[in-house]
Amino acid sequence: MDLIRLIRLLPLSALHQPYLAWIAPEIPFLEGIAMEGSVKCDANYTPLTPLSFLERAALVYGARTAVVFGEKEYSWRDMRERCLAGASALARLGVGRRDVVAVLAANTPAMYELHFSVPMTGGVLCTLNTRHDAAMVSVLLSHSEARVFLVESQFLGVARDALALLAGAGAIPPLLVMIADDDGGGDRDGVLEYEALLRSAPGGFEIRWPADECDPISLNYTSGTTSRPKGVIYSHRGAYLNTLATALANEMPTMPVYLWTVPMFHCNGWCMVWATAAQGGTSVCMAGSLAPKTVFEHIVRHRVTNMGGAPTVLSMLVNAPASEQRQLPVKVRISTGGAPPPPHILAKMDELGFNVVHGYGLTETYGPATLCVWKPEWDALPAAERARIRARQGVPHVMLEGLEIKDPATMESVPSDGRTVGEVMLRGNTVMSGYYKDPAATAEAMSGGWLRSGDLGVRHPDGYIQLKDRSKDIIISGGENISSIEVESALFGHPAVLDAAVVARPDEHWGETPCAFVTLKDGASATEADIIEFCRTRLPRYMAPKTVVFAELPKTSTGKTQKYLLREKARAMGSLPPKLSTSKL
């Protein structure tokens, strides 16, 4: 009998580490030896999954409203029954464990339900960006190997074209199911219809709980702001933990009212689909575009307590005509991320009655990963200073184990001086399981034991981080690093500017110089010279834009500016000649 086996037969009271270390110092004795009397069994362990939130919501809040969509309302008891019916219908269509079910839909009750009904079958939910064209949809359907494809009727044309492309390439297309705009039911033009499937689903469906909490629950494709989208795998465990972290970070009360201005297809609605179930809340879904007037009307009508949106949503609300803005009945907590919101936008949101929670995250981190935790002593600061602090990305939420600013070459953390730039890196239970079918990309993204974000930032002396740019967006001009974010912040201070983005333009003398793409407010006017001079009074001269282009900025459906398209436009403009780029630098 070897020494380790002998030691493991001894009573735990006999395992005094000093003596064992003297006998055989090379053996890590206490690793894997449980405390005497401890067990792991069904009574004290079950795999973590957001599906449990729905079960509890139906029990505790059964008669309360779960989802509102126009004149339609569903209680939590209704919601559980509809999700079970959806799972039963999908199972009858052949969906089983790890089968992918794709969805192309806006924020509708069906989209909400599928976040529960698909994983109830053991399947994996794959929500697609509603702004994708048929070619991209076909690529993602092929890559995900989706077995069933549920499509809201307004996107049926795109879906059919995508399926035709798949068939033309010799691939087997998924089964198409239409989510109709009405409840007429029945199959239409040979296409299965969602509500009809629910009504005809066999009863008594038993939820297929995950055998392992690390089983996949969803497949989310990255937004494509920098490159071809990659499929990010979420687990039941990660989704469960990030859901709780998101609810805590946004101070969601019991029975909150959440207004859906974040697309549910984006990181599963920043995990808010599951968070509203965890808290027994009401999800208010809006049809059509996010017009400021409509948003304010929904807030007032439903007494909304929480919502979210990219900085463009904040800008839209702040710059809405006074006739469309409304007095808020309660303080509305709104979470934002994706890009640092300009300080003056944050200040104006506060004046309107919104409490902005600024955070940061990636598709690879289930959405939100950090937040700018507010401290009471900051309340006494001047408004401009409060807004400047609130614009920082902050600290990790309670479920993220590590957040560092590191030198990507040495993996050493940079000084917490608010000046030294490094790459934002994260680690913990709310980091993705990996990229689907792309082990090389997974290994690269998580090399060194940290998720490498590709974002550049600094850490302040108080431990709060602040983004400076994406690594691809830093402008290197004459050897100086220029943060496009800092230039954009200056641009947003101009009274005529509604939206702005800054990228590098080739320059024959400096290598690169800042090129600003600017959208003006309705009725406002400004010239290129006006914008450049305004920036020069607020920035070092080398950081001010050398070129200003007035245009509508290309956006993803989540409100992020597609800078790679702007970089292409800037490159297509050609290099600035020396006489233009050096005359006033």
Image: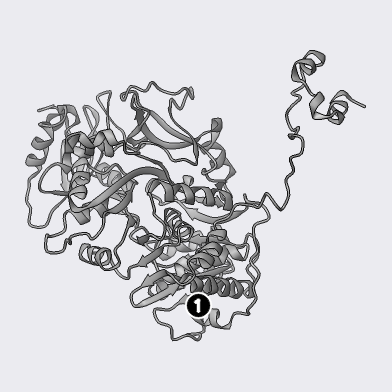
- Taking the spot 27% from the left edge, 49% from the top edge, the residue there is 355
Q: Nearer the viewer, residue 144 or 262?
A: 262
Q: Is residue 39 above or below residue 264?
A: above
Measured from the top left, where is residue 108 in percent x and y? 40, 69
Q: Where, quadrant-wise, is the N terminus in this rendering?
A: top right
Q: How is the image coloured?
A: one colour
Q: Nearer the viewer, residue 86 or 445?
A: 86
- In the image, is 396 to the left or to the right of 219? left
- In the image, is 438 to the left or to the right of 393? right
Measured from the top left, where is residue 516 in percent x and y? 20, 42
- Taking the spot 42% from the left edge, 65% from the top edge, the residue there is 134
Q: Where, quadrant-wise, is the C terminus in this rendering?
A: top left
- Taking the spot 45% from the left edge, 54% from the top edge, the residue there is 271
Residue placed under numbered mark 1 in the picture: 194
Q: Is residue 544 above or below residue 560?
A: above
Q: Residue furthest top?
A: 22
Q: Is residue 120 above or below residue 216?
A: below
Residue 558 image-quadrant placement: bottom left
Q: Residue furthest right?
A: 1
Measured from the top left, where is residue 462 in percent x and y? 35, 27
Identity, as a three-letter code, of the amino acid under mark 1: Tyr
